[in-house]
Image (spheres, coloured by chain):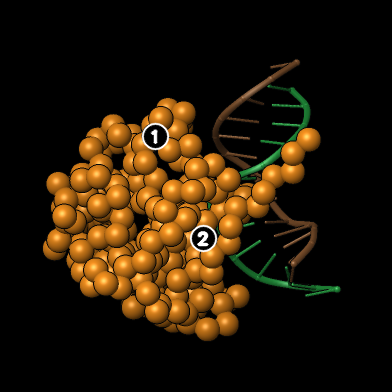
Chain colours: A orange, B green, C brown
Amino acid sequence: MSPVGRPTRRALARSVLEVAPALLGAVVHHDTPDGGVAVRLTEVEAYAGQGQDEGSHAHRGPTRRSAVMFGPPGHAYVYFTYGMHWCVNVVVGPTGQASAVLLRAGAVVEGVELARQRRPAARTDRELARGPARLASALGVDGRLDGADLLDPSSPLRLLGPLGGAWPETVRRGPRVGLAAAADRPWRFWLADEPTVSPYRAAVARARG
DNA sequence: GCTGCGATTGACT
DNA sequence: GTCAATCGCAGCT
């Protein structure tokens, strides 16, 4: 059974495979001096904790980058990749387990004008948050928000819920995107018939000697 | 200290 | 369809 209703620390402390699909349809809001942008999540990926998931940043234990993953649920794990992109996760599961949900895509439901300014390359509004780095960019999130408490009413970056708000029959699942390790695990969840879901790209097979 | 590559994107053929 | 951008991490010497 999946958590339902308002996002609480307790609800997010459930197993990552329960929480990840429950985040579909939930809203993430970021307030800045420029204004607010809110995104309704349409696509997420689950990452299990230390020693359980070769594709997770937490797989080999805590590092400075992954430290937030080892803390309590309900905080943002924000990391920098490919030398230019930020991606946002929600830490879930019991404290210390280091599982998280990557926010892969969503629909901008508030602050569309501001999101357009931040994402000039987007040719249509559905591209504003279509992809994990695009979602972070549309929200205006970067490394300064790593560790932010998404459940704290005074936090600029918040998870507003609802949890478990998506109709179960609209939830799809399949392999995760861009992972060479543990690529077979169907831990990507998305909403059917949503134009904001990112196009699937299988992991690039590494050339072997 | 050095090297290879990544939970990606946008531009281009 | 292909590929460069760009830098922090992780693994190795």
Quarter of image, res A6: bottom left
Q: Amino acid at mark 2?
A: Ala
Q: Is disc 2 placed on a helix, strand or loop?
A: helix
Left or right for A171, reference C9: left
When asked about the image quadrant of residue C12, the answer is: top right
**Residue A193 to residue A187: above or below:** below
Q: Return the x and y of residue A199 as percentages of the image width and height.
A: 54, 69
Q: Determine if marks 1 and 2 fall on one subunit.
A: yes
Q: Which element type, helix, strand or loop, lies under badge 1? A: loop
Q: Which residue is mark 2?
A: A133
| Residue plotted at (21% across, 49% down) | A12
Mark 1 and mark 2 lie on one chain; the one further toward the N terminus is 1
Image quarter of the C terminus of chain A: top right
Q: Position of residue A67 (x, y in %)?
A: 39, 34
Q: Chain of mark 2?
A: A
Marks 1 and 2: which is nearer the front?
A: 1
Q: Residue at x 14, y 46 (%)?
A: A10
The N terminus of chain A: image quadrant:
bottom left
Disc 2: CA contacts within 10 A as few (<14), some (14-19) or many (>=20): many
**Mark 1 = which residue?**
A52
